[in-house]
Image (tube, coloured by chain):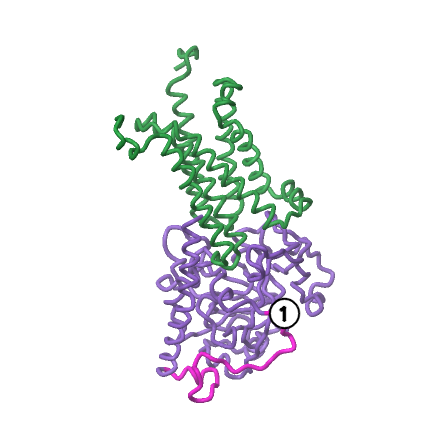
Chain colours: A purple, B green
């Protein structure tokens, strides 16, 4: 469709400008509330840059370009088109940001983002990202293990699952208002406790060595690299430990199409399309060839044991 | 309109309008291919190209379906341009299928056949395309003469099914309910429903009118 094609160009031209504007906003915020201290940066460093440690969990595959990572993704809070997040997320205010950590924990708290991050060391995690729509990227995330945050909350023995919740703020999230609302809000997700505690599972605050752009789930998002992208919930305001399996947004929207587990699995097709192959974004333009999708998105060595004995066709 | 002066060459004769439909109609295709091959079509150029061509095909199908209701309801007679609209719609459908087979599926015919059998949205899309092929082949005066006007008309009523299938193909493809496929489906449904209504209003001669 011609109009959409045109808007793609426009948004891709806007994207760098959006990042530029966000950067200024960040610097302004740093002056106001000392956000540079938030990530433990030396005084006078460029505010948006993050100090990170390298991680053995990182892939050595070539990362997808910053432009593609920040201009092509799903974030329905800003619209259903994959150019919408980059075009419309600019007005989201991410400072101050409070995360409510609660449920079956001994230390429930409303935690400011900087306090949530302070005790942990930021790491760079270069992960494959596989969307359920059969495209994939390689993204250099910056984040902390989710396990750090959960351990500090001191989980109770009865906690079996972790539920996550995205911000609801229609005034700054245009996808949450108007006539066509694709999903009920808030967007919710969940993991089994052992999945949440797995060292691959991180809470990301940045990508490409800088704080997250709004369109990628600023200021705090989940990244679970062996599951389809929609499990990696964005702009998190709530983390709740539960005994029962929590409701998840896409599972509720289409239970026969999207399961609770949503592990990347080339042998279990989406009812309407194949999951056996994927297209890596940014490779070869119109001559981009499909590549084979790997079991657990290539993380089988690390995570297959979590699902030993489970029927993955039934628990998709 | 009708003059014999040289100035008449500047007025829009039906032939000029037809040529205009064919050439202007293909401008979006040229533009979207240009964008695709110059890296200006975003992160997934194949998908964007494929979807754009499919959507343009549906648009021209819808405009073609609007010709008869426009004539009967608004008195605007565009019937002499309907063939051009239909053929442009077919050209887009052909490009759409070509991009699917060649760029999207990398000419993997076995995988394509599996898709057609297994994926309802592909099945329905291919049904729509398969219907359009004979309609396009018979969209010329020679074929009308050969088939006879009545059977030619009967054959071309299959376009209703092709358009409905195209709408369904689009709806089956999307996640959740973005407005575009539903809007196209609603317009198509209205244009087809108008035909049912029109037929009911004026039953053909010889029909049993006493039941009304």
Q: Which residue is mark 1?
A: A61
The crowding category of the residue bearing disc 1, from other C-alpha atoms within 10 Å (few below 14, some 14 to 19, many at least 20), is: few
Say which of A27 and A267 sits in front. A27
Q: Quadrant of the C terminus of chain A?
A: bottom right
Q: Is residue B190 magenta?
A: no
The x, y position of residue A60, in whole percent, is 64, 72
Q: Is residue A61 magenta?
A: yes
The x, y position of residue B83, in whole percent, is 44, 30
| A193, above or below A266, in the image | below
| A46, above or below B177, in the image | below
The x, y position of residue A242, in whole percent, is 56, 67
Q: Residue A290: name its quadrant.
A: bottom right
Residue A160 visible in the picture: no
Q: Residue at x 43, y 40 (%)?
A: B59
Q: Residue furthest right?
A: A309
The x, y position of residue A23, in whole percent, is 40, 75
Say which of B37 and A1 sits in front. B37
**Residues drawn in magenta:** A33-62
Q: Main secondary structure of the magenta part?
A: loop
Residue B205 visible in the picture: yes
């Amino acid at each position: 469709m011609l109009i959409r094609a045109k808007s793609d160009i426009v948004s891709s031209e806007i994207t760098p400008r959006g990042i530029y504007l966000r950067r200024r906003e960040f610097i302004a915020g740093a002056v106001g509330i000392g956000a540079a201290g938030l990530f433990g940066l030396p005084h006078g460093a460029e505010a948006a840059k993050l100090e990170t440690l390298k991680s053995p969990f990182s892939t050595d595959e070539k990362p997808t370009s910053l432009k593609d990572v920040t201009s092509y993704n799903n974030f329905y809070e800003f619209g259903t088109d994959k150019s919408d997040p980059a075009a419309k997320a600019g007005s989201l205010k991410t400072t101050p940001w409070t995360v409510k950590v609660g449920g079956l924990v001994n230390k429930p708290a409303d935690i400011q983002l900087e306090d949530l991050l302070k005790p942990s060391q930021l790491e760079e995690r270069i992960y494959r990202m596989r969307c359920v729509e059969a495209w994939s990227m390689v993204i250099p995330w910056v984040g902390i293990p989710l396990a750090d945050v959960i351990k500090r909350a001191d989980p109770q023995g009865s906690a079996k699952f972790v539920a996550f919740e995205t911000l609801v703020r229609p005034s700054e999230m245009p996808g949450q208002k108007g006539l066509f609302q694709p999903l009920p809000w808030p967007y919710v997700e969940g993991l089994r406790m052992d999945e949440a505690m797995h060292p691959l599972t991180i809470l990301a605050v940045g990508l490409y060595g800088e704080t997250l752009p709004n369109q990628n789930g600023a200021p705090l998002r989940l990244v679970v690299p062996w599951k389809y992208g929609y499990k990696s919930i964005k702009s998190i305001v709530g983390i709740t430990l539960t005994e029962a399996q929590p409701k998840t947004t896409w599972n509720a929207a289409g239970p026969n199409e999207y399961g609770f587990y949503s592990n990347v699995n080339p042998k279990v097709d989406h009812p309407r399309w194949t999951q056996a192959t994927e297209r890596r974004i940014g490779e070869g333009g119109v001559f981009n060839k499909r590549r084979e999708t790997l079991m657990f998105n290539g993380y089988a060595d690390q995570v297959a044991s979590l699902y030993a004995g489970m029927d993955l066709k039934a628990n998709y | 309109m009708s003059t014999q002066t040289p100035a008449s060459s500047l007025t829009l004769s039906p032939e000029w309008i037809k040529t205009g439909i064919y050439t202007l109609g293909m401008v979006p295709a040229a533009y979207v291919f240009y964008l695709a091959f110059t890296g200006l079509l975003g992160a997934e150029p194949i998908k964007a190209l494929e979807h754009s061509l499919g959507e343009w095909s549906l648009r021209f199908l819808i405009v073609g379906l609007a010709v008869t209701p426009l004539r009967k309801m608004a008195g605007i007679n565009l019937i002499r341009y309907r063939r051009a609209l239909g053929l442009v719609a077919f050209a887009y459908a052909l490009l759409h299928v070509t991009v699917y087979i060649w760029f999207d599926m990398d000419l993997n015919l076995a995988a394509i056949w599996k898709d057609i059998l297994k994926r309802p949205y592909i099945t329905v899309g291919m049904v729509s395309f398969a219907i359009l092929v004979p309609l396009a082949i018979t969209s010329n005066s020679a074929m009308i003469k050969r088939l006879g006007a009545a059977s030619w008309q009967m054959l071309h009523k299959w376009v209703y099914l092709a358009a409905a299938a195209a709408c369904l193909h689009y709806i089956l493809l999307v996640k959740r309910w973005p407005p575009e496929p539903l809007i196209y489906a609603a317009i198509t449904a209205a244009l087809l429903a108008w035909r049912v209504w029109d037929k009911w209003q004026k039953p053909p001669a010889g029909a049993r009118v006493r039941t009304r």
